[in-house]
Image (tube, grey):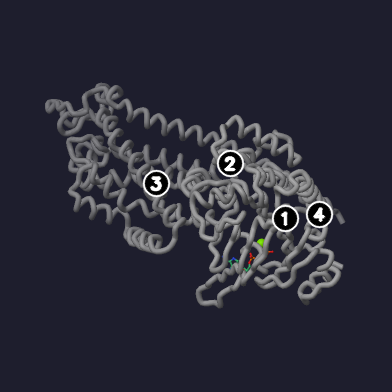
Amino acid sequence: MNRMSTDPRKTDHPTVRPQKIRKNTVRTRLIFFSLLALLLLLGSLFSEQLAPYDPYLQDLSNAKAAPSAAHLLGTDRYGRDMLSRVIAGSRASIFSTLLLVAVIAAAGTLIGVFCGWNGKRADTILMRISDIFLAFPGLVFAMAVAGVLGGGLHNAVIALALISWPKYARIARSQTLAQKESAYLKAARLAGCSTWQILCRHLFPNILGPILVTAMLDIGTMMMELSALSFLGLGARPPIAEWGSMMSDARGLMTTSPWITFAPGLAIFLSVMIFNLLGDTIRDYADPRSRQ
Amino acid sequence: MEAVLQVKNLSKTFARKGRPDVRAVEGVSFSLLKGECLGIIGESGSGKTTLVNMITRLLDSDDGQILLNGKDITRARGRELREAYREMQMIFQSPAESFDPRRTLGDGIGESLRNSGMAAGQVRQKTAELLQTCGLTDGFAGRFPHEVSGGQCQRAAIARALAIDPSVLICDEATSALDVTIQQEILHLLNDLRRQKKDSLSILFICHDIALVQQFCDRVLVMYQGRIVEEGLPDDVIRSPRHPYTQRLIDSIL
Ligand SMILES: Nc1ncnc2c1ncn2[C@@H]1O[C@H](COP(=O)(O)OP(=O)(O)OP(=O)(O)O)[C@@H](O)[C@H]1O
Ligand SMILES: [Mg+2]
């Protein structure tokens, strides 16, 4: 019998190399998408300097002009330069989204850690509340809330925040429950840490990974939902340059001047895709199986 | 002799939904004398970990009293409890899990010192000394728990427990997770520490191996189903066990 064929060291070898290759591609993907996301972020930060024209300057004599050398993405029904408006709109879309995701991730995590750590009544009540939010389809609920609050970009952000924190609370809670009884937290207590110190120094860094990954994957979704609310007239309102409301504004001209809808649509599509792929890559990177 | 740790009538019952309650510890009383090494042996599930978790106040007791250096800590919380932890430390059953996976061993060893207000430079120096005492080079301070072997990790755990110079050291099966040769090394280390510290260190040594207890302890308690069923000098207990469980325990290793 050839015993070498069942030797685990033999079979070990071929599996090591693909993993290494995979790891490297994950890292290049991470760098690539991080750079793209950074580019988007910088673009929205310096949108005023980047825009070739004033995004709010009307020129009715040059309305609904098709893309040309002077106006790369054409002009809208008031003759405003579409490229400038798309660039200006990135601020509302991207910054509001990042702020939104940061707020819901932080708030949800705090609530989740609180529930998981303390248990008892407060836990039961808060988790039932989060069940209610999770039971509804998100966007429909957000529409209802934004409708009650009465539209506007701020209110759209608030509406989405109200309905989106439970996901983070769930993750943080289950992570907290999983770590709560672990020996290293007990050791920290014996080392004289107060509960607050244990949470900040030890528990929090150990549950951060999955929350961060969820937040990254959520950026694209939130961007889309924010634009959707604006498209439905429940978010940013004209004349404010925001991709969703720009698309909504131009949808009547879809057949005659499609570029007015097309430009912000493409912007939404590209940025949602970039942030989603970045989130995916970070998840792959954080996965311990792709490490080592 | 003066008692550094007194446990009176300690009890714990775990309530479980839909199933009968587990009486993990029932009316356990004993004293740990100054400079003594007291062994507690008992089979798996006899309530040893529950008992020491109550003593270290990681778990609330249902009934009974715990006195540390004459001070009642049965219901101690917050600052009072942190004061108690400067006198009482524990070495956990699984060394690797008792260190924060995201922090270095040095960070874990120095934590109690930092919490007691020692300056960073001094903490670093003391950590290096402690590592040396426990038979590790000071390079281990920068390693993560997953980068060291079980035995090395347990040495670091001992260094951490000794950092603030406690008068009571509790070892909850400190050697069970290690293989036999490493077990002996750790026992040698603990023995050296005892010789060094003499009366200023008392050890509560939880174990399920009666041979280790005989080798290491001055006195032994036998625990069975949450109760203490026998007490005496290890040699006496082994030579003439009075409880049938102790008899079985001895038969199983001879
Ligand atoms: N949190 C808990 N809830 C319910 N039952 C528990 C809990 N913790 C311990 N028990 C039960 O209490 C009894 C004593 O457990 P304990 O962990 O103290 O035993 P042990 O002597 O330390 O065992 P081992 O040698 O395996 O560590 C066991 O029957 C166990 O199932
Ligand atoms: Mg145990």
Q: Which residue is mark 2?
A: B111
Q: Are marks 2 and 3 on the same chain?
A: no
> What residue appears at the point 57 percent right and 67 percent down from the top-left corner?
B64
Ranked by sequence position, the earlier of labels 2 and 4 is: 2
Q: Nearer the viewer, mark 1 or mark 2?
A: 2
Q: Position of residue B151 (x, y in %)?
A: 74, 47
Q: Are marks 3 and 4 on the same chain?
A: no
Ligand 2 contact, mark 2 (Cβ < 8 Å): no
Q: Nearer the viewer, mark 2 or mark 3?
A: 2
Q: Position of residue A18 (x, y in %)?
A: 65, 42
| Most foreground residue, A241 or B139 | B139
| Residue B177 circle label | 1
Q: Secondary structure at mark 1?
A: loop
Q: Which residue is mark 4?
A: B180
Please determine whether, in this image, residue B191 is positioned above or below residue B220.
Answer: above
Letter of the chain that mark 3 sits on in the rendering: A
Q: Position of residue A95 (x, y in %)?
A: 32, 36
Q: Which residue is mark 3?
A: A105
Q: CA distance from mark 3 to mark 1?
A: 39 Å
Ranked by sequence position, the earlier of labels 1 and 2 is: 2
| Most foreground residue, A126 or B156 | B156
Q: CA distance from mark 1 to mark 4?
A: 10 Å
Q: CA distance from mark 1 to mark 2?
A: 24 Å
